[in-house]
Image (tube, rainbow, N blue to C red):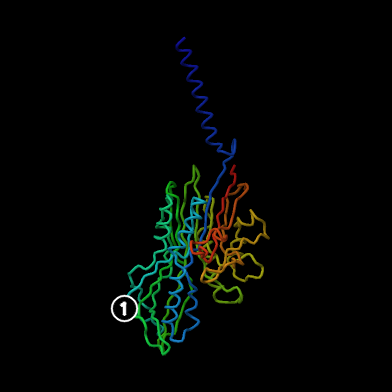
Amino acid sequence: MINRLSLLTSSLLLCVLSLNAGNALAGPGGKGTDVYKLEVMTQNLYVGADVFRVFDGAPCGPMQAVYEIFETVQATNFPERAEAIADIVMREKPHVIGLQEVSLIRSQTPLDNAVVPNLDGTFTYLPNAEYVVYDYLELLLNALGARGLDYVVVDDATSMNADVEFPMASFDESCGFTSIPTDLRLTDRDVILVRGDLATSNAMNVNFSLNLPVEIPVAPGFVLAFEFTRGFGALDIDVGKYTYRVVNTHLEVGDADVPASPLNFIQYVQTLELLGAVTGTPLPLTVLGDFNSSPSLFDPRPAYGLMMGSGYLDLWTVRKGPFSPGFTCCQDEALRNTVSALDRRIDHVFAFLPAGAKLMPIQSRVVGDRDNEKSVSGMWPSDHAGVVTTLKFKQK
């Protein structure tokens, strides 16, 4: 009797184990089907001013222009804006966040005039200022932590981009100094944040081989030159029992008005390099960031068309259709425009899915574009809105 009862109990246990194993293999989508779900966010943090104003000229030269640009950076107050962005993250709680323009601003007073001569007769300021004025990454992480949110930086997926330094000072009407000349250093980064309860692997970062060359005449016969480097970061992330590949990038600005602009050629080459480096993984692939290129037929900037022509899905149009605006750029430089000025969609979430994958209903929304998402003093969180997308598909 005991042996027969033991045999029956063992048989029942084996059945239960077999059923559980079958359910685990089948996944939440039912027998023989796995359901994948990943929530991502992309957000350009905005350095806080239009840095291209340095080319517009100022009565007392580039040092004055840089000083005035930095005044705008201070006025747009990233410590305050970081709180507004953290509120959005707290509401959305994505698995992974791709950040662009994660600025590190440092200074040195007085300036040291440390320059390096280049072979073409130009000079480059040595980026050696170390006093931290603003670390946008630290400020955002502190704001997230204050809300009980655990997001971690994957260092190997951080793209260290342009690292440039330039002197600045204020002047009177006769172009006499009214402040001590100071070196101001900007280090640009693209950063991937991942929820602390999720594992990552295979992180990498790459700088593009072709970047924007910049030359600024400072005085007769003295031209400052540097390269504004950009790049991308990537990692694998485990969500539940599935692994995904996520890539974060910020491409060159391009020129929306001049199709043959060298800026568009640089963006073209950068996009091709990005595609060549990340396409082909067997994992579900999500590529997000500030592409500086829109789906508009009147936008000559090439990145969007190259991504779509390479078989990527624009998850915004998958969810909203091709005619939904989903604008993400750009608010006024000072961020205090009362009515949103967003009028183009250049921040995207693209996906490249494994063969045989069947898309399920996708959620995608623009964030940071509503009045109730502004900072405490009424600024927009960034000149860019963010995009939060939940990708969901079945894989048989």
Q: Is residue 192 above or below residue 107?
A: above
Asked whether 303 or 165 is in front, the reply is 165
Q: Position of residue 182 (x, y in %)?
A: 35, 78
In which image quadrant can residue 159 be found?
bottom left
Residue 201 is at least partly visible in this image? no
Asked whether 83 or 45 is in front, the reply is 83
User: Looking at the figure, which quarter contains the C terminus?
Assistant: top right
Q: Position of residue 263 (x, y in %)?
A: 54, 74
Q: Position of residue 6 (x, y in %)?
A: 46, 16
In which image quadrant can residue 143 be found?
bottom left
* Amino acid on which disc 1 is placed: Pro
Residue 15 is at least partly visible in this image? yes
Q: Is residue 104 above or below residue 94?
A: below
Q: Position of residue 292 (x, y in %)?
A: 56, 67
Q: Secondary structure at mark 1?
A: loop
Q: Is residue 243 above or below residue 294?
A: above
Disc 1 crowd, CA 10 A, few/some/many (<14, 14-19, 20+) = few
Q: Residue furthest front?
A: 377
Asked whether 244 or 112 is in front, the reply is 112
Q: Residue furthest top?
A: 1
Asked whether 11 or 250 is in front, the reply is 250
Residue designated by label 1: 110
Q: Is residue 393 above or below residue 275?
A: above
What residue appears at the point 59 percent right and 62 percent down from the top-left corner? 307
- Left-right relation of 52 to 187: right
